[in-house]
Amino acid sequence: MNALPARIACVGLPGSGKSTIGRQLARRLDVKFIDSDLVIEQRIGCSIREFFEREGESAFRDLEEAVVDELTLDGACVLSTGGGTILRPANREHLRQRTQAIYLHSAPEDVFRRLRNDQNRPLLQVSDPLARLKELYGVRDPLYRETSHFVIETGRPSVSTLVNMILMQL
Ligand code: S3P
């Protein structure tokens, strides 16, 4: 049997299933599950949305970079990253070199359907969230691909099917 990678990271747009899939994957591999957004929220003592509003995106990205640097050196785990983590070159490099990174690919229209009623995504609190998602996708899709070791299409399959697909590729 091949040795499984110690650290696995999920990257992709908000609403692509990083946390849901990552949690199930960690359970199947019997390793801990870490959500970098939750780690950040524990450190700042408020929601990311509040922090964004108060301190701005760049302060959030600085914090995110420090947390990702730390978590990608932690023990065996499945790490779910925030959708914008790949914007910083240092994060792309750390994810690529220190983890087996999986891009959970979703079309912006699918993400829009899933997140329509979610008030907790600061970047989507705009008058036309679908247009915003398409714009984010245009910028980020190449960066998710550059960072990841393989891509999983999240369109139709159930979460457990997606987890099985990932397990077959590891
Ligand atoms: C962000 C995505 C969020 C969170 C923050 C910024 C982004 O994480 O890190 O609101 O830039 O796409 P999710 O992808 O888990 O929603």
Image (cartoon, helix red, strand yellow):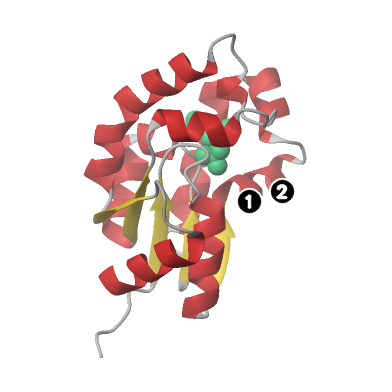
Say if disc 2 is inside 8 Å of ligand 1. no
At label 2, counting other C-alpha atoms closer than 10 Å, the crowd grade (few under 14, some 14-19, many 20 or more) is few
Q: Quadrant of ligand 1?
A: top right
Residue 149 location (% of width, % of height): 24, 56
The numbered dot on residue 39 is 1
Residue 6 location (% of width, % of height): 38, 74
Q: Amino acid at mark 1?
A: Val
Question: Which quadrant would the C terminus be assigned to in this image?
Answer: bottom left
At horizontal 61% and vertical 28% (from top left) the residue drawn is 116
Secondary structure under tag 1 reads helix
Residue extending farthest to the bottom is 1
How many marks do you count on the picture?
A: 2
Residue 82 location (% of width, % of height): 50, 41
* 2 and 1 marks in contact (CB < 8 Å): yes
- Indicate left or right for 42 with 5 as reference: right
At horizontal 59% and vertical 8% (from top left) the residue drawn is 127
Q: Is residue 146 above or below residue 158?
A: above
Residue 170 seen by the camera? no
At horizontal 71% and vertical 48% (from top left) the residue drawn is 42
Observer-nearest of 119 and 148: 119
Q: Is residue 111 above or below residue 70?
A: above
Residue extending farthest to the right is 45
Q: Amino acid at mark 2?
A: Gln
Q: Quadrant of residue 72?
A: bottom left
Task: Return the residue at label 2.
Answer: 42
At horizontal 41% and vertical 42% (from top left) the residue drawn is 12
How many angstroms separate mark 2 from mark 1 (CA)? 5 Å
Secondary structure under tag 2 reads helix
